[in-house]
Image (cartoon, rainbow, N blue to C red):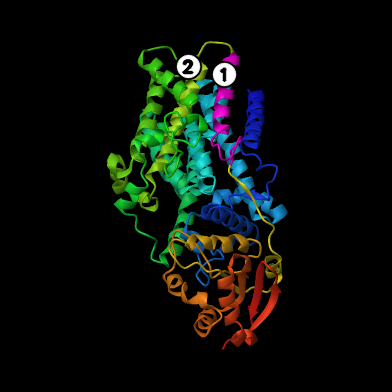
Amino acid sequence: MRAWVVVAAIVGAVMVTVLTYPTVTKMGSVGRFDTGDGRFSIWNVGWVSRALITDPRHLLDANIFFPHTGTLSYSELNLVAGVFGVPAYAVSHNPVAATNSAIVIALWLSFMCMWAFVRRLTGSPLAGLVSATAYTFCPYLLAHTAHIQLQMAFVVPLTFLALHRLIDLPTVWRGVQLGLAVATSGLACGYYGIYGGIALGVAAIWFASSDRAYWKGLAVALVTAAVLVGPIMFAYHRARADVGGGRVITSEDLRHYAAQPIDYLSSGAKAHELWQPAKFSGREPLFLGVTASILALFTLVAAARGRRLTVAPWTVAGYAVVGAFAALASFGPSGMLYTLLFKTVPAMGLVRVPARFGLVTMFAVAALAGVAVSTIRLRRWLALVFLVMVAAECGAQTEEWGWPSWPVRAMSPVPHAYRVLATLPRGATVEYPFPYTSENTHNHTKAMLMSAYHWQPMVNGYSDIVPDDFYTIMLPINAFPDAESFAIMKQYKVRYVVWRMNTYDAESRARLDARFPPFMRYLKPIVQDEDVWLFEIVDYP
């Protein structure tokens, strides 16, 4: 069986390399620079990786929204992704390489965990390969390549694998292992930790044993997870308390981000346009794929008719229940189940996208598909045919990107000014343009991305939570240099000012140039390249 572990590891590595091309071959130079969420993810992983290496005590004190502290907690922490990025960052000091390595590691782990789970469930390593491919490279994850936390999908099969190990042999040590898996899930992605944890609870009840050792193992798992996650969550909530604890999630939010039944037939795949002729836009693509769905349906029909399967009918029913439970919860308030969960599970107040429950449904479908592959009594070549069919569906997701369709862009060279800024004494920095409208604030992530190459504290910032004083200064600070904006700079103890000159049109550039003459004695030019200017404030009016 060890040989199969090696085979699965190699197949998983090849799949990740091929289906995310050119990520592996251009680790430090491609990414989702075309979206605010993509830039935010790169900054986030870069910050966590760097902080873990250089100053873990101040991990939460990210370099945005200066002079506020604890600003990493204003959004998802992404600690696990940051840990995955540490080796690449330690070698290269490149946040893009750290992020891509985190994605590659997470996808490979997703493949391996799903493979190990289905192999344990069915006894078939080949079935595990089919399920692992369908799950790891599903349309849902492809649609969220800009969200680093949503790429941590390995935690769902990891926790269910740990649960089945406890079911098979309930011991304290296996309870600790389940607790470690649950803690990893919560620290990897809040959505997967909460939604996946609820689904895991459903499975734990469904497969419950009268053996006292089983319940003791579950108790140990809960205590282990609480001990590991508790201190981090305490620090997280304490930091958020400084800005009011964050935005209150309303029922309108939940309805807006809820799944619709049609989402379970939606994807970005060209091959799936038969029933969705309009190009996928704005919905969660929760369809696992034609091949995997047909295989899962085969399992359900066979179990309903009493056909012999490689797993017990009770197990098939259990994963049908888990998948249906998650699907119903993904519909948000309209499905009623989510409302019940929202009122009874305290952590539900931290998340606002019910549709992301759908990943658990896709996990259940992939598991049931594996049961079908392991049950069909034909030669092994048929399983390989299924594997090729699933891989082909996963690889040809969109016409826009070609095949394979992993949506990355090449990064432009880092301007010289940022390299110089990295060598200067530590000082608060403002970067222009400084977006100030609600429709444009995500563009602060451009300054955040570049800050990952100098790590000076930034007044700029973008996150789920925004301090009130940031809204106050957003508009007047844009008039710099003038008397009012200089007063803001003094209040915030700003030392460096950066202008991305290549973003200004002729009219905006003329207005900016006209403001300089009366204030040049307070500003020291350090870099004045065609694309980026860097100045130091040496005095105040």
* Residue under label 1: 383
x and y percentages locating residue 516 in the rendered image: 60, 82
Q: Which residues are magenta?
A: 380-406
Mark earlier in primary sequence (2, 1): 2
Asked whether 296 falls inside the magenta stretch, the response is no
Secondary structure of the residue carrying numbered label 2: loop
User: Given the image, on which type of amino acid does mark 1 rest?
Assistant: Ala
Q: Identify the mark at residue 363; answer none if there is no mark.
A: none
Secondary structure of the residue carrying numbered label 1: helix
The answer to which of 84 and 530 lies nearer the viewer is 530
Q: What residue do we see at 35% from left, 34% from top?
A: 325
Q: What residue do we see at 47% from left, 57% from top?
A: 75
Asked whether 404 falls inside the magenta stretch, the response is yes
Left or right for 41, reference 6:
left
* Residue under label 2: 310
x and y percentages locating residue 368 in the rendered image: 45, 24
